[in-house]
Amino acid sequence: MLKHTTKIRVRYGETDQMGIVNNAVYSRYFEVGRTELFRHLGLPYSKIEQEGTLLPLSELHIKYHHPAVYDEELTIETYVEEFPAARIRFKYNIHNETGKLLVTGETVLAFLNSKTRRPTRIPQYLVDIIKPYFDLQ
């Protein structure tokens, strides 16, 4: 399994008048998590795009357990349990400073050839980088 943890602090502009994070912000937190996971692998999104691959979002699922509030430090756990083929499925857990689970979620991104804008399989360079994280026979 491929897994990475990122910390982020809730900013004022992400909250409502009561200091609670707006529900729509969590999808941005998921993006931060997966972006940092790729960066940790030495593959920032910019490099993936330079290699001719786009990763559009095709699915987003969020379950809200408890609210996050202004100025809390959040931990975003991002992981990939299944080896990707034509799509990559990310799962997320977001905890607050005390370890309370606030949000769980999932996103699915498709691999797209940037020239043809057609779906494609996972590029070989990405296979080579993430293969060691999975038990493949």
Image (cartoon, grey):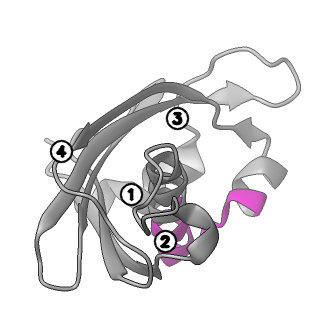
Cα distance, mark 4 to mark 1?
11 Å
Cα distance, mark 3 to mark 4?
15 Å
Cα distance, mark 4 to mark 2?
19 Å
Query: Splitting the image into 4 quarters, where does residue 20 fall?
Result: bottom left
**Which quadrant: the N terminus?**
bottom left
Cα distance, mark 2 to mark 3?
15 Å
Magenta run includes residue 97? no
- Mark 1–mark 2 CB contact (< 8 Å): yes
Amino acid carrying mark 1 in the image: Ile
Closest to the observer, 86 or 6: 6
Label 4 sits on residue: 136
- Please provide the residue range marked out in magenta: 35-46
- Mark 4–mark 2 CB contact (< 8 Å): no
Q: Residue furthest front?
A: 17
* Residue found 16% across the figure and 49% down from its top: 65
- Mark 3–mark 4 CB contact (< 8 Å): no
Closest to the observer, 128 or 119: 119
Label 2 sits on residue: 41
Magenta run includes residue 44? yes
Label 3 sits on residue: 122
SS category of the residue bearing label 3 = loop
* Residue found 44% across the figure and 69% down from its top: 19
Question: Dot 2 surroundings within 10 Å: few (below 14), some, or many (20 or more)?
Answer: few
